[in-house]
Image (cartoon, rainbow, N blue to C red):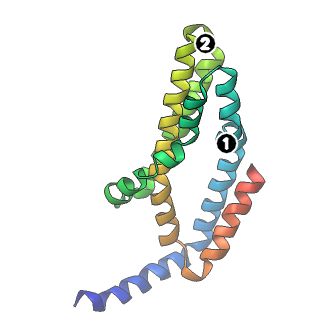
């Protein structure tokens, strides 16, 4: 009996997604554009190794920090299971804001209050900030993709995902 209601629910959700598509698409593209504007300031793959090398860290620590994206991928399983609920859009936004906020807080403290850091504290703070940054982004990514998929009509998904990448590229 429940299966007979599923196609109706899917059609209703698709109708809502079509009705709100313009607003949803604008929000998605603007989010990616703003994210792209911030990426050059924290470009993980190029800026972080240079910064860690300038701080005199070991190659082992550098390799560990650069592999955080791979090490922390299992967090997606946790977020997909435990955080994927009715307030998932809020979870995504809070996670992204917390990731950026933690990393920005470290960067501002390191820049404007350099006397409070020992050399080891500077490196440790950077490593901790990046563990939090990468972990929160990975937690949120699977939920963000689910939110996008649920709110974009099936026939428009390819177009909107292309527009997301265009906005990200234009921004960054």
Residue at the extreme left: 1
x, y percentage for residue 94?
46, 45
> In the rendering, at what x and y percent does residue 135 appear?
47, 43
Label 2, secondary structure: give it: loop
Name the spot of residue 82 as percent of width and height, x first.
31, 55
Q: Is residue 139 left or right of residue 52?
A: left
Along the line of sight, which residue is nearer the eye, 26 or 92? 92
Which residue occupies 69% across, 62% down? 165
Residue 41 sits above or below residue 146 on the image: above
What distance separates the C-alpha of mark 2 from that of mark 1? 26 Å
Give the answer, above or below, for where 35 lies relative to 7: above
**Is disc 1 placed on a helix, strand or loop?**
helix
Residue 56 picture quarter = top right
The residue labelled by disc 2 is 113
Compared with 54, 148 (above or below) is below
User: Which numbered disc flags the more N-terminal residue, 2 or 1?
Assistant: 1
Q: Going by the image, does 5 lie left or right of 54?
A: left
| Closer mark to the observer between disc 2 and disc 1 | 1
């Amino acid at each position: 009996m429940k299966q007979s209601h599923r196609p109706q629910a899917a059609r209703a959700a698709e109708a809502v997604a079509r009705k709100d598509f313009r607003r949803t698409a604008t929000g998605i593209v603007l989010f990616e554009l703003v994210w792209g504007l911030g990426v050059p300031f924290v470009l993980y793959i190029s800026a972080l190794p240079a910064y860690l090398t300038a701080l005199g860290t070991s190659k082992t620590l550098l390799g560990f920090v650069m592999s955080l994206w791979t090490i922390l991928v299992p967090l997606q399983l946790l977020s997909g299971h435990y955080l994927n609920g009715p307030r998932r859009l809020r979870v995504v936004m809070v996670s992204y804001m917390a990731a950026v906020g933690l990393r920005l807080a470290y960067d501002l403290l390191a820049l404007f209050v350099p006397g409070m850091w020992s050399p080891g504290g500077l490196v440790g703070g950077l490593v901790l900030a990046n563990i939090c940054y990468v972990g929160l982004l990975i937690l949120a990514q699977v939920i963000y993709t689910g939110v996008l998929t649920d709110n974009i009509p099936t026939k428009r998904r390819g177009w909107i995902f292309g527009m997301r990448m265009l906005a990200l590229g234009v921004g960054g």
